[in-house]
Every structure is written in C-alpha cells, then in structure tokens.
Amino acid sequence: MNIIGISAFYHDSACALVQDGELVAAVQEERFTRRRFDKSVPLYAYRACLEHAGLTPADIDCVAYYEDPVKKLGRQLWMELPRLGAAANPPVLDATHPEREIRERLGFDGRFEVVDHHEAHAATAFYSSGFPSAALFTADAVGEWATTSYGVGDDDGVRLLEEVAFPHSLGLFYSVVTSFLGFAVNSDEYKVMGLASYGKPRMRELLETMVLSDEGGQFRLDQRYFDLRSAGRMYTDQLAELLGMPPRRSRDEVAGEHEDLAASIQSLTEDLLLGKLEYLHTLTPSPNLCYSGGVALNCVANTRVRRKGPFTEWFIPPSPGDSGSAAGAAQLVHHRLTGRRGTRRLTDARLGPKGAPSALAGVLDAAGVHYEDYTGRESELLTATATLLTQGKVIGWHQGRMEFGPRALGSRSILGDPRDGTMRDQINMLVKKREEFRPFAPAVAAEHAERYFDLDVPSPFMLETVAVLPDAHLPAVTHVDGSARVQTVTAEDDALFHALLVRFGELTGVPVLLNTSFNVKGEPIVGDELDALSCFLRARLHTLVAGPLVVHREDVPPAWYGYADQAARYHAPAVSADAYTFFV
C-alpha cells in the first residue's frame, strides 16, 4: 500500500511516501522552489517521492493530510474576526480549500484522509521510533487548537489523552520572546536558543509571572502580555513594562539585556517541559518517550529534560516540525487502514532525492571549466577532501540522497576543520553571513563521540547539545558555554560521510568535522548539484565536492561569481539547467 502524506498552507510544506508502513521518501518543497519555508502544495516534492519509488499517481492508494481544516477554521475565525472588517483584502477562510487545492495541483482523485495536527506530530515520532509502545508528547505553537498533547502509542495506534488548548502554548511563549528580541517567528527561535548561552536568566522570575499552572498537565498564559490576534507583533506594551526594557528592533545591536532575556526564556522553557513530561509519566508509565512538534527542535532543552526526566529511552524524529507531519499523517493513516504498522527505527534522515552529478559535469564541460572526476576512486576522493580540510579549506559537500528536516547531516553540508580557531568566524562572516553569536555544529564518527563530547546516546539527527570535553580542543564547534550540538555518524547509516570523518581523523587524530548547512543566509539548503554550484560561487567556498566531482575556486572563471547571483534569482524548479546558461 502506498500512502502519500502532505503538509501545506502554513509554512515549510512537505511530501512523504509510506509504503507498507515504512517511510521511504520525504522532502520539503522549498528545496525545489528555492523559496524558504515554502507553504504551497508540495508538487515538486510529490513528484520526487514518486520518482524515487518508481510510482505514478495511479499507484497511490490514499493521500493523508496533516491537520483538520474544519477544526482549524474555528481558531482562524477567532483570530481573524477582529481585523476582517478593516482588511482591504480579507483572508480566505475556507475549510474545503486544502483538499480541493491538493487534488487539483496533484491531479489526484482517490481516497483523501485527514488527521489532527498533533496526531500527525505524535505519529511521525512513534512510527519511526521502533518502540513497541511509548508515551507521546507534542509541543508546538498551535495545531488546530491543541498546543501541547499527552498520549500513548502502541499496536492499537496513536491516542491523545489530554491537551492544552490555544492560546496557551509553550511554543508561542518562546516565539513571543523571539519576536520581542527582534527575530523572525517560526524560523529564528534557534537564534534565541544560541543567544541564551551568553546571558544570565535574571529575568526568569518576571517571565514566570506570565505562566499560570493548573491541575494535571494544564497551564495558562496571562493574556495581558500577548497579542495573538493582530497582524503585527505578538506582544502588548505591557510585556515591555514587565521586563523594563523596550523591544529590540531587528537591526539593533544585541545587548546584554537581550542575552539575559534569551537565557531567561530558555531556562524557564526547560523547566516547564520537564514538569509536563513528569506529568505525562503519571498518565502512561512507559520507559519510552516519543517527542515531536516544533519545540522539539530546542536541542539544548532536549538534553537537559532527557537526562533529568522520568523516561529511559527517547526518540525525536529528524523533522519534528510541521514538515515532518507529512510523514506522520501517512504513517498514521496506513496503520488505520491496514491495522499494520512499521517497526523499523529511523536512524538515517536521507529520505530525499538522490544527486545526479552528470548535470553538473555537463555544465562544466560546456563551459570548459576544469574539474577532477574521482568516479570509481572513492578512497582517493576521501583522501583529497580530507587533505583540503586539513589545509583550512571550506568545502561544499553534496552527496547522495537529500536529508529530510532542517539539519544538514552530511549530504548537503558545508564542512570545515573544527580545530581551527578562526574557522567559525570565517564561515560566519564570509560564507553564511549570519550573526556572530551563532555556533556551528560538529559531526563525529559515532564510535569516537565519547572521546570528545559528554554524550551518552546516539545523536544521528543533531538534536542533542552537550558539553565538549575539556581536552577536546575543538574551538570552531565549541559554543561560548563549552557546548556543542552534536551529530553522530555511523558507517551503517552513512558509509561515505563516516569514511570522510575517519580519513580526516587518520590525518589529524580528530575524526570530527565542522558541519553546517549548505546554503547562504535567507535561502533553503541546496537541492540539486546546480543549486550547489550556485551556492558554492556566491558563498566563495574553496572547493565543491559533488558526488565524485571536485571543483576548485581558482578554476572558476571570475565572471561566474557575478553571474551566480543572477542565476539564483532565475532558478526554476525542474528546469534549473536553464538558469545556468549564464555560466555556459
């Protein structure tokens, strides 16, 4: 049975394919359209999932959608009614729109099933965990109405036992502070998490007054400080009065008070999460926890509540946010229709389309640009790449199937030497063009992780932040508080990336690399090789390694760098080669 899962119309739309209960393909639409957080119907992602499995639309038994449009409409009306009358172009609020638009865009006339948003979140964690049964916890900004859910998963399916309803939301609480700090909501919360390490939680007691605890797993947010029904900011003037500071504008310098506010919301969020998980354990005293929702991307909180919380075994999927709900919707609907579920634990997030280096070779050949081709010589490719990294080169690494989720995990990555104390600032300022306070993450050969990091569990999806051991000497990937967001890599899950880490370790004694996403500020992670070529040029990387092909910066015609920005603007899905007539 072939089930397609869809998330769309809010942000970060995606498509996933589940075959006989197993997740076999999943990808976000932004990787094709090059529009960050693209929320449109994931047509190109759908096409990629079908192509991966060799299917046509006629082979699809059902499309599963990740939220209930009828339930969501009630919340939308509550939020939109105050400003509908004043709006020149009022929003279209139509519960039939998602199914109608998806059917039309995908050309699908078969069975269409809807699941609740938090059911989809919980399902993407549970059905990929490999656990026979587990407690389920979901925390995000909001689904239809639910913002926090407690449940259980077993052979009978996913059952949510209790929920906290909008507008009371841990995710929204964190997002409101994100907005107050001058960052973008639904994308920059991780900046607040990184900034928190620089500050002291001296405003925590003030923030605590905004959260009112009720019995069980319930809580309320004091609505005097929140403005969730206007089109602009998410907070009222009373929040600034409470904190004794004005909101930061996006272009303002980051000051000590901003660092302290970030530290305060991070500390409070961790304790609130810990309390909710302790409550969940009273409902379902399983040793296993499956955790999902956007809040699960807070990797600093993950490690603390995992270590201090009541559950022995954890699983967080590689894409716990809304894009991952496409997978959860399909997995849940498959279980409901067949009574069967997948039992394999997901340890490899490479669920997207595979690279095709021939397209890049064609462009380079047509332009007469020199490149090295290591086809059939993988060991030599690894040695050449590792040697460049030891020389301080910054490398764009594009290999195999694309990762699903927000993290680059060794398929669409920018790599550097973690021992180089200048590497972090070099990539931050020249390549990524982002805030200097943001850290970079290390990837480590899994069998050596405990030599460098205080890590007691596998971390294949880069969702744990732990202390770097004192004698590790990895300045490029060590945050100001001595921590790092670690990815562990095994030979079983990613043989090539693991082999590169090992080869670098053979040359340096350190099987660790700086690993950040292959993109520039404001853009999605690269998709195909031509995206990689464009990013390689605009980011001024030293070398591009795409499949077996190696291109060095010094071999690229100078004019290409100017053309690259133009080509990026004209990039079109499925015809990306046309955008590179500039290069040829």
Image (tube, rainbow, N blue to C red):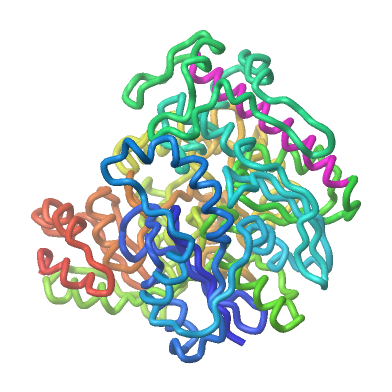
Q: Is residue 316 above or below residue 1?
A: above
Is 207 displayed left or right of 251 in the figure? right
In which quadrant will I find the N terminus? bottom right
Is 495 displayed left or right of 571 in the figure? right
Is 566 displayed left or right of 491 in the figure? left
In which quadrant will I find the C terminus? bottom left
Q: Is residue 392 magenta?
A: no
Q: Position of residue 541 (x, y in %)?
A: 29, 51
Magenta-drawn stretch, dominant element (helix, strand or loop): helix
Is 287 displayed left or right of 482 in the figure? right
Range of the magenta residues? Answer: 257-281
Q: Is residue 266 magenta?
A: yes
Q: Is residue 77 above or below residue 402?
A: above
Q: Position of residue 283 (x, y in %)?
A: 88, 49
Which residue is at a point 57% across and 33% down the rendered structure image? 174
Q: Position of residue 45 (x, y in %)?
A: 41, 71
Q: Is residue 171 above or below residue 39?
A: above
Q: Position of residue 550 (x, y in %)?
A: 31, 66
Q: Is residue 240 visible?
A: yes
Which residue is at a point 63% across and 13% down the rendered structure image? 202
Which residue is at a point 60% across and 45% down the rendered structure image? 140
